[in-house]
Image (cartoon, rainbow, N blue to C red):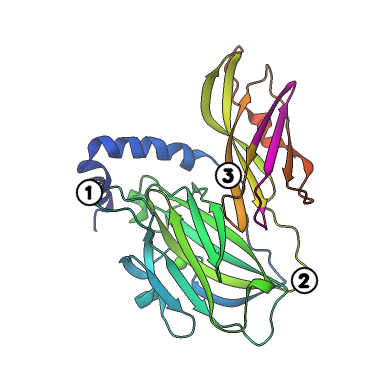
Amino acid sequence: MKNRLTWRMRTFLGERPGTGLVLVLLAFPAIMHISSQTSAAAGDESVVWSIGRPDGSSIEFADGQRDKITFTIGQSTPKKDFPARQSGSVNLDASLPSEEKPYTVIFDLPQKAGQTYQLIVDYIFQVLAPGEIRVEVNGRKGIFPLLPQPKEEVDSDEGNVMLLAKQQLTVPIEASWIKPKGNRITLVPLGVGEVMYDALSLRKRSGAGAPSKTGIRLEPTIFFRKATNGLNEVCRLFVPFSRRFDKGSATVTVGQEKVTKKFSSAGYDFGVRTEAVEVAVPAQPAKATVKITLEGRRDTGVHSCPTMETLHLPQGS
Ligand SMILES: [Ca+2]
């Protein structure tokens, strides 16, 4: 059996032991942190096209990775034309240039268009996962965080993988973005590391669309920072958006403490904005309230974030 651990250690640890160690340490919080997962709603969806099967394995894809691909639905085949691996935009080797590695799927629509669509991508991570992925739909640019979750190995090969993880990414796509012929969806992982593909599919949603499970979320991390009045916990705020915005703000209230963060969509047209927010650690576990305002649109509201109840309070504080 090919020893992938040895290969991986040689590639990511052995040749640059210091760098590799840092990467492993940085990766663990992401792997260990369990976040909520979106999934395809069953029943009212129909598959427009699919590449691969969501079975936890990328064996049906081509070996290796490439700098870029164009995969045409109805003409290309996964085993020859869609590599299992896709590198992040930042090269680990400082002597080599960092550049994006776009994978593009080209497709025509079947006769009957849907009201809304979902691109569903099942990822596998065997090394450090890039931080975000850019999803372009006919020129519209979306941004989504990559949030690895624990994955069970499907074979002995994966059994040797230290950072084995997975994610099902759901990208909402409005019907008006899709045309009858020559659609282009491009995936670009941003950051250090790589993704592997288990399966991709574009699905039509027949109804008006149930609300996405991907709502505004505030999640704790394992990181704390010294503050003037004690300790701040670094939290991650996820804000879904469907239009470009310049002026957004988030106000997080925990007990008597309130913190406001301002942000924009950074030139993206849709997706999930990820912001780090430092929240003062309360004297006892407390629920956080998040208020989001995105320049005059009705994205304003108060959102309860029960995950904050699990704030990591130091013992005896
Ligand atoms: Ca698969």
Q: Nearer the viewer, residue 115 or 195?
A: 115
Q: Which residue is mark 1?
A: 95
Q: In this picture, is 181 found above or below 265? A: below
Task: State the CA–CA distance, disc 1 to disc 2.
Answer: 51 Å
Q: In this picture, is 282 found above or below 15? A: above
Could you say which quadrant of the image residue 209 lies in?
Answer: bottom right
Q: Which residue is mark 3?
A: 274
Taking the spot 64% from the left edge, 38% from the top edge, the residue there is: 262
Tell which tag, 3 or 1, sits nearer the viewer. Answer: 1
Q: How many numbered discs sit on the rendered protein?
A: 3
Q: Nearer the viewer, residue 306 or 22?
A: 22
Left or right, 252 with respect to 181, comes to right
Q: Main secondary structure of the magenta part?
A: strand
Taking the spot 31% from the left edge, 68% from the top edge, the residue there is: 63
Circle nearer the N terminus (1, 2): 1
Q: 10 Å neighbourhood of mark 3: few (<14), some, or many (≥20)?
A: many
Give the amino acid at mark 3. Answer: Thr
* SS label for mark 3: strand
Q: Nearer the viewer, residue 99 or 256?
A: 99
Task: For the C terminus, give its image quadrant.
Answer: top right
Q: Which residue is mark 2?
A: 207
Tell which tag, 1 or 2, sits nearer the viewer. Answer: 1
Circle nearer the N terminus (3, 1): 1
Q: Is mark 2 within 8 Å of ligand 1?
A: no
Taking the spot 41% from the left edge, 49% from the top edge, the residue there is: 191
Q: Position of residue 66 (x, y in %)?
A: 32, 66
| Span colored in magenta | 241-261
